[in-house]
Amino acid sequence: MSSGKILPRRQAVPVLYTRGTHYEVGFDMGRTFGSMIKNFLILSKPLNETYLPLYQSPKGRQIYNETLGSVKDSFPQYIRELEGVADGAEVEFHKRLLGHTEDALTETLNHYYFVVAHVISDKPQGKYNVKEEHFMSLCYAGHLPGYTMSQNHHGLVFSINTISAELLRSGKTPRHFITRALLATSNVDDAFRVLKDAGVGAADACSVNFTFLADPRQMCYNVEVAPSPERKNESHLNIKEIPLGEHNYHDQANELMIDSSISRMRTFGAYKPPMSEQDVRHMLGDVSGGEYCVWRENRRCDEVVKTIAVGIFDLSGRTVSLYSDNPSETEPHCRLPLLFK
């Protein structure tokens, strides 16, 4: 039974291995983590105080239906995946779809899991005609995989930062579906094609950091994805190349995010460039930044945003280490091998 309680940080990273169709993989996630998903729906203030009331209004229902129709045209398989999650967890489908709006708020703490999924379809699916996907991804409870930290069997490794777009577009592709589609890509050009989303374009914004382990250029990329300011039927992309071995910090776009980014940039600027995994762990666990620390958890007040988990991808060792607590003070809960064909 779901109580709607906010629990102290748990020392656990649940991991699910699943294989099947999109619906079956979604159903397994929903059935396995149903209690967590229901609890998250109860706790989510944006969902209950903003998006559900908006959904009940004529304008809100119009936006919902336009966006759902657009996603069904481009990615019907991911709608089936979400329907599987909803059925497995025994929750209403529209609350799962509406829930794909806010991330990493305090109520997200303890409401996530790590999924290793092998999706097999009998015929090509969606606008990119995908038949097979094999990936691992940290998922917020009930959400599609792909919107946090992820890796696939083609050697793609990526992480996502939410950024705030100045304008949002109804009837376009929500960022969670774009990043879900990214999980099926097999090379750099394929990834850029998915992020561009020609014919539709992004409804909102995010920043993607990615690389392919087999990329002959040995390059990492930071791509800011946003709705087209010229109202074109494609995403607006701002691409930055980062040679492998160098480092990059990401900036943000609204007032709360800007203040946090300035503080974190100042903290990172005091460090020498990281040379080892231990250096990275110390940087990601830094709590010296005052109100906006790198590791966000102030036990003395109710913060809007908290760091819920950390994943460190070792591209040389080909592993991912998962932490539910400060990585500078704790050991990883697990270290999983990356996937390869």
Image (tube, helix red, strand yellow):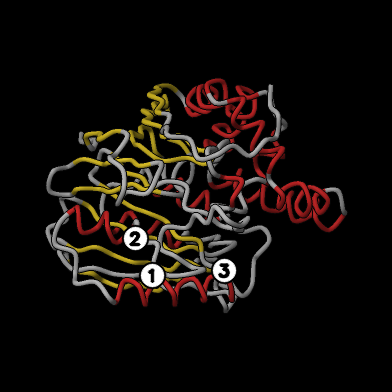
Q: Which quadrant of the structure image shows residue 43?
A: top right
Q: Earlier in the sequence, mark 2 or mark 3?
A: 3
Do labels 1 and 2 touch, CB within 8 Å?
yes
Amino acid under disc 2: Asn
Q: Residues within 10 Å of mark 1 (few under 14, many from 20)?
A: some
Residue drawn where x is 23% and y is 68% of the image: 247
| Relative to 44, residue 39 above or below | above
Expressed as whole percent of the image width and height from the top left, the position of residue 18 reads: 40, 23
Residue on which disc 3 sits: 164
For marks 3 and 1, give the CA distance: 13 Å
Which residue position holds label 1?
250
| Quarter location, residue 249 | bottom left
* Numbered disc in front, either 1 or 2: 1
Query: How many angstroms separate mark 1 from mark 2 (CA)?
Result: 9 Å
Can the viewer see residue 144? no
User: With respect to residue 160, does 289 lie above or below?
Assistant: below
Q: Secondary structure at mark 2?
A: strand
Q: Nearer the viewer, mark 3 or mark 1?
A: 1
Circle 2 residue: 209
Q: Residue at x 37, y 24 (%)?
A: 17
Closer-to-camera residue (230/3): 3
